[in-house]
Image (cartoon, rainbow, N blue to C red):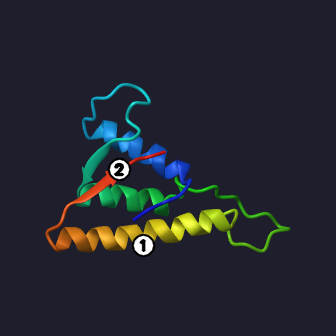
């Protein structure tokens, strides 16, 4: 999967890298590769469901979008790609393959 300019994903994965025991110094955790497991994917899915990765906006009486709707097309694009990634990554793991995240910002 490839993302373009999805900064919140980059930050989230960088934090995951350190939680998983990454040893590089501050900000050096970017441009690294590390393996994702099922538990990591579960945490990523929770982050999506809890709206941690997108510029969400609270519903306003003048706004017809439901509460929690992405602010713009880019957030919708990121959400769709993130969900597609989860689907493909889970299938890859089920098929016995490794899922590796590589950050190149």
Measured in 3D between alpha carbons, the distance from the residue under mark 1 to the one under mark 2, in whole angstroms, is 17 Å
Give x and y (percent) for residue 85. 39, 68
- Decide which of tag 1 and tag 2 comes sooner along the chain: 1
Give x and y (percent) for residue 8. 53, 49
On the rendered structure, is 11 left or right of 88? right
Counting other residues with Cα less than 10 Å from the Cα at mark 2, is it few (<14), some (14-19), or many (20 or more)? some
On the rendered structure, is 55 left or right of 78? right
Q: In this orientation, which residue lies closer to the viewer: 89 or 19? A: 89
Q: In this orientation, which residue lies closer to the viewer: 74 or 42? A: 74
The residue beneath circle 2 is 102
Task: Note whether residue 90 is visible.
Answer: yes
Give x and y (percent) for residue 104. 43, 46
Q: Is the Cβ of the residue at disc 1 closer than 8 Å to that at disc 2? A: no
- Residue at position x 70%, y 59% from top? 58
Counting other residues with Cα less than 10 Å from the Cα at mark 1, is it few (<14), some (14-19), or many (20 or more)? few
Give x and y (percent) for residue 51. 54, 58
> Which numbered mark, 1 or 2, is in the foreground of this view?
2
The residue beneath circle 1 is 84
Q: In this orientation, which residue lies closer to the viewer: 79 or 6? A: 6
Write down the quadrant of residue 41 in the picture: bottom left
- Residue at position x 32%, y 72% from top? 88
Instruction: Give the SS element for disc 2.
Output: strand
Image vertical order of residue 34 relative to residue 28, above or below = below
Q: Where residue 66 is drawn, which disc sits there?
A: none
Instruction: Give the SS element for disc 1.
Output: helix
Write down the quadrant of residue 82 in the picture: bottom left
């Amino acid at each position: 999967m490839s993302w373009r300019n999805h900064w919140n994903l980059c930050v989230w994965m960088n934090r995951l890298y350190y939680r998983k025991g990454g040893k590089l110094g501050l900000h050096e955790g970017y441009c690294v590769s590390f393996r994702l497991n099922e538990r990591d994917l579960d945490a990523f899915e929770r982050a999506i469901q809890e709206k941690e990765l997108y510029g969400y906006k609270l519903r306003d009486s003048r706004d017809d979008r439901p509460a929690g709707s992405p602010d713009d097309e880019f957030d919708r694009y990121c959400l769709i790609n993130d969900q597609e990634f989860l689907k493909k990554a889970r299938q890859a793991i089920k098929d016995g393959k490794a899922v590796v995240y590589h950050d190149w910002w």
